[in-house]
Amino acid sequence: MNNFKIASIILGVHLIIFSCTPSRFVNTLPKGETQIGGSLGGPMQNLFGLTIPTPYSSIVVGHGLRDDLTLYGGLHTTALVFNTLQTDIGLTKRLYKSDSSQSWIPDISGSFTLNSMVEMKDGAFDLFPQIDFNAVWKYGTGKSNFVYIGASNWFDLSKYKAHKEPKDNAVIFSPHIGNTWQKNKWSFTIEYKVLALMQSNRDIVVNYAKWHGDYSVPGIFIGCSKKINK
């Protein structure tokens, strides 16, 4: 087996177990607004004497269907290098809007996403539903910036792991915290995520950082986006 095929298999496993993207549109866009953005980052790994984030990349487009409902779709560009077409499409719904006079009470949002992966060489296909919930606190001039905390839940619908091994966990749970700064047409986000909480990080080829012990992997992501129609 050549090195490229080995790397492809390893990447595919990581994409599933460590669901490597930051949160998509935790705060809904205004009706009619469209944004395009990109992100970079992933699980922290020990490499060359340093602890650095894995440089997974993706691009995403979001559109405000209503003030409280945003549609989005993403393409995972790093996966393409390894012959995997990975996409996500979903909706974010604002479930609760806080009273502006009580700034300590957050908005609440929920997202439903369908993550798909197609192995372009043999056509193998996997689908992973995802449900996220976030609490969003807005601050700054015009309440344009916001900090958020929440969790991502991936659902693995397959019955077995590789080599027909029984599956330990069908739900991949990843809590996170992040902050978005917005100015004019641009926004910048940084997010810290505890990837695959309760999933073992032992006996894996990649030397992941173990900041939280043997049953998760820390991840750091950065992203930026731009309004393209307002």
Image (cartoon, rainbow, N blue to C red):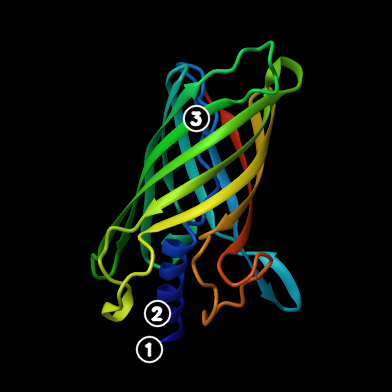
Alpha-carbon distance for marks 2 and 3? 39 Å
Marking on residue 40: none
- The amino acid at mark 2 is Lys
Q: Decide: marks 2, 3 in contact (CB < 8 A)?
A: no
Residue 207 visible to the viewer: yes
* Relative depth, front residue between 28 and 39: 28
- At x 45%, y 75%, the residue is 10
Instruction: Report the residue at 41% width, 62% height from top.
Output: 16
- Quarter of the image where one finds residue 126: bottom left
> Dot 2, how many residues are within 10 Å of its Cα: few (below 14), some (14-19), or many (20+)?
few
Along the horizontal axis of the image, is 47 left or right of 164? right
To which residue does mark 3 refer? 109
Tell me if 193 is positioned left or right of 166 in this view: right
Asked whether the residues under the numbered discs 1 and 2 touch, taking CB atoms below 8 Å apart as contact, a structural biologist would say yes
Image location (x, y in percent) of residue 147 = 67, 34
Tell me the quarter of the image containing the N terminus: bottom left
**Which amino acid lies under the numbered mark 3 shown in the image of this protein?**
Ser
- Looking at the rendered structure, which numbered label has been put on residue 1? 1
Q: Secondary structure at mark 3?
A: strand
The relative height of residue 134 versus residue 15 in the rendered view (above or below) is above
Give above or below for 190 relative to 137. Answer: below
* Of marks 3 and 1, the one in the foreground: 3
Residue 183 visible in the picture: no
